[in-house]
Image (cartoon, rainbow, N blue to C red):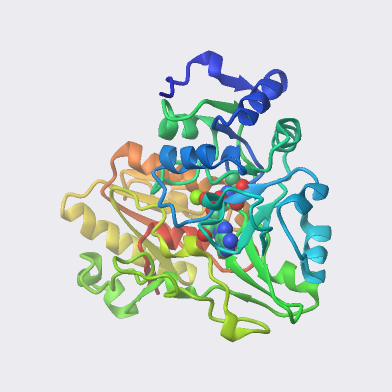
Amino acid sequence: SHKSLKESSVLQSDERIAAAAASLAEGKLIAFPTETVYGLGADARSTEAVEGIFEAKGRPSDNPLIVHIADRAELDAFVQGVSEADEKLMDAFWPGPLTLVLPVRPGALSPKVTAGLDTVAVRMPDHGIALALIAASGCPLAAPSANRSGRPSPTLASHVREDLDGRIDGIVDGGPAGVGVESTVVRTNTAGGATVLRPGGISAEELGRVLGAQVGAVSADYTADIDPEAARSEAGARGEALNPAREGAAGAKPGDTGPAAVHGEPEEAPRSPGMKYTHYAPSGRLEVVLGAEERTADCIRGLLAAAQARGEKTGVLAFEEHLESYRGLADVVLSLGSGSDLREAAARLYAALRRFDEEGTTYMLAEGCGEEGIGSAVMNRISKAAGGRVHRV
Ligand code: TXA
Ligand code: MG
């Protein structure tokens, strides 16, 4: 029943926020920019509207959604019992790329939003258009990333159009999203600590500083390590030594992917249901190479040569400083920005992965990065896209 997104329904932010907000209030689906990625919004209280989100995205219905608010006063309507640790994190990071998992007030939201859990994930985006839209709609907005399930999250309105044209009611175009990877999802515990359920724009270190407590992170289980020797051999180049991805593998059950380190209540380790899904997998085969500069470059050159020899269309995703050394060795060479600022890598990653698909590359290699700060989110997303194939050299 959704029309194609004609010019008239691609809303210009400044003049059309009121119209988009009115559509949301009527139960329609509107994509909008946030400081992380574009979200696909709908009234979180309306089961019909929320079902529309799952349908438009092709998203499994047991993966709950994040609810977006513009003002902390809105929390009371659907959350009960916010802890001191939660308050501290809100004070420090809202508005911003931090999602808190909080106890839901029974009956206040569509049960489809929480996928039947007794908690709800909430955030206040740091984006003028998003905040104005939420406030004007008068709704708590359920908003997952505005991509088709299994595609990279959209960092531009054109990405949303590529994936969801004809399936939603409008897009508010606010130009490029800022951070480029999704928010950090966190659950606090009764001991005043917290666990990062999904790494994102705010690091565990930053959270720990504010809480004055150790913040555990999700397990690094998303990587399927590769024998470093095999990685440099031709067998490695053919992928024979690679383990299957542990996470997102067929048959993964809820509870398979718990956090490795939990401060406080290890026996009650919280789960982020979304972590069990393979998120994005490019049509070609993506592998990540992580190690000291020289060894990384050697490994990538070796793997590329072997891939060229078997007739693959190859791609490289590397830091700006190394691009020259790969030119001529791969068919498509894309930049992650400067290695000295991983915020650039976060901002560029998803668009680069979409670009590989457009170019039809069949074998791609990406340089990995350190897991400090936003680097942990970059490595998390890139490793997931690679199905856990990480060469540690
Ligand atoms: O940056 C973002 O967070 C973007 C923008 C649009 O705000 N949104 C986003 O939403 O990434 P989505 O739906 O793609 O990701 C929601 C994540 C999933 O990993 C989901 O499993 C987790 O949050 N989540 C939602 N509700 C939860 C809950 N009650 N407990 C634990 N994890 C939850
Ligand atoms: Mg998503």
Picture quadrant of residue 242:
bottom left
Say which residue appears at 81% left-offset and 64% top-offset.
87
Which residue is farthest top?
8
Vertical arrangement, residue 140 with respect to residue 174, above or below: below
Q: Classify the position of the C terminus by image quarter.
A: bottom left
Counting from the top left corner in percent of width and height, residue 135 is at 76, 35
Q: Classify the position of the N terminus by image quarter.
A: top left
Left/right placement of residue 363 relative to residue 149 reads left
Say which residue appears at 79% left-offset and 70% top-offset.
85
Vertical arrangement, residue 263 with respect to residue 385, above or below: below
Towards the viewer: 81 or 238: 81
Vertical arrangement, residue 4 with respect to residue 284, above or below: above
Say which residue appears at 72% left-offset and 77% top-offset.
193
Counting from the top left corner in percent of width and height, residue 141 is at 64, 41
Whether residue 167 is visible to the viewer of this picture, yes or no, is yes
Towards the viewer: 367 or 56: 56
Left/right placement of residue 164 relative to residue 114 reads left
